[in-house]
Image (tube, rainbow, N blue to C red):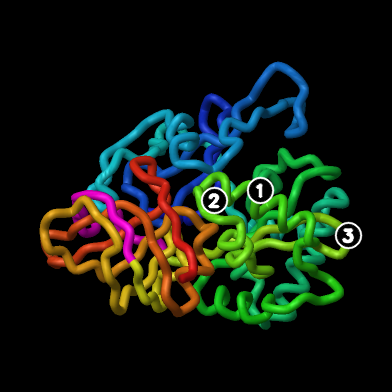
Amino acid sequence: MFIIIVLDKYYLKDIFGNIHVVIGNRHPTSGYISYVKYIPINKKSIWYKNGIYYQRMVKQYLPEEVHKSYINKIPDPWSDSLIPFAPKSIINEIYDPVNRLHEIINKPQDILEEEVLELAKWIRSQANIQWNCIGVTGSILPGIHNPLISDIDLIIYGSICGWKVIEALNYEDKVVKKFSSSRLLEWSNRLSKRYGIPIRHAIALYRLWRRGILYTGREFSIAYSSDKPKSFCGDKWLTIGFGRIKAYVTPSLHSLDYPVESHIEKYSVIEQTVTSNVDISIALSYETFFMPALIEEGWRIIDGIIQYNPYQGVGRIVVGVKERLGYIIKN
């Protein structure tokens, strides 16, 4: 039997015309973990394809807003929560980011696709990676983008390719630039308010390898993911409270994945509601904004929910969930 592999940042279209975004690489055999991002509407909008206009359902990537877009929900023992789910029975089209980039390589259709190709070529050359490591996602993936105002969203598949891109994009170049001071302040101020952290901590998490400006003035973002699917039937985790800790983190094999994961080498508790003695050995973030804080070694202040794995006898602190948004800042 032919098995279709679906990974993080793939897009799906259902029988109702809704467009879903795939979340992570863990999916049950009966469907995909995903949320609805665009729905067809009967009036003009900036997203358009083949005579159909679309409206964006998720405007801010906050857990509670994404939660509202769920059509179906299923329980997930690994996250101890209800998660968004699209059954295979309603999906009639799957958009693969790598295949979509290959289409653009063969024949870009507009100025935005030409810029996608130029950026992807530059990244491939600078990082010395193969084409099958790079995909294009966002509104460009299903082809509903607006060539004049849409941003470029790329994704790098595979840890080896991901680390190469991060190393290559540590510095500005004539092709890619960091945010201007005013744009960085605007971006940081918005995230500072979202997570309730001082703006200096938001600024400290800006990285060119996550987002920047193409020489044309177009903004781009880069996501990272494993290139392998994972079993949906994993360990069972139980939420046992909330906490804030000071922890020394080091990258793990799953740091360039979604959710972002890091080892906790040592820590001290600042405050918590957990009454039992749990050894917290993992930091996990569903908010990719905090990715630099977890893939770079050092001391962090981490606020989130505390979960316990009764089979392994270990705990983890989780950031970016509906129950508690939390944060990770450099200490």
Does 38 sit above or below residue 177? above
Badge 1 vs badge 2, beta-carbon distance below 8 Å: yes
Residue occupied by mark 2: 10
Dot 3 or dot 2, earlier in sequence = 2
Q: Nearer the viewer, residue 292 or 142?
A: 292
Stretch in magenta: 229-245
Is label 1 in a helix, a strand or a loop? loop
Is label 3 in a helix, a strand or a loop? loop
Is 75 covered by the magenta stretch? no
Q: Farthest residue toward the top?
A: 42
Residue plotted at (52% across, 79% down): 160
* Tag in front: 1 or 3: 3
Quarter of the image for residue 219 reads bottom right
Residue 104 can be seen in this image: yes
Residue 15 falls left or right of residue 315: right
Q: Nearer the viewer, residue 176 or 86?
A: 176
Q: Total number of numbered labels?
A: 3
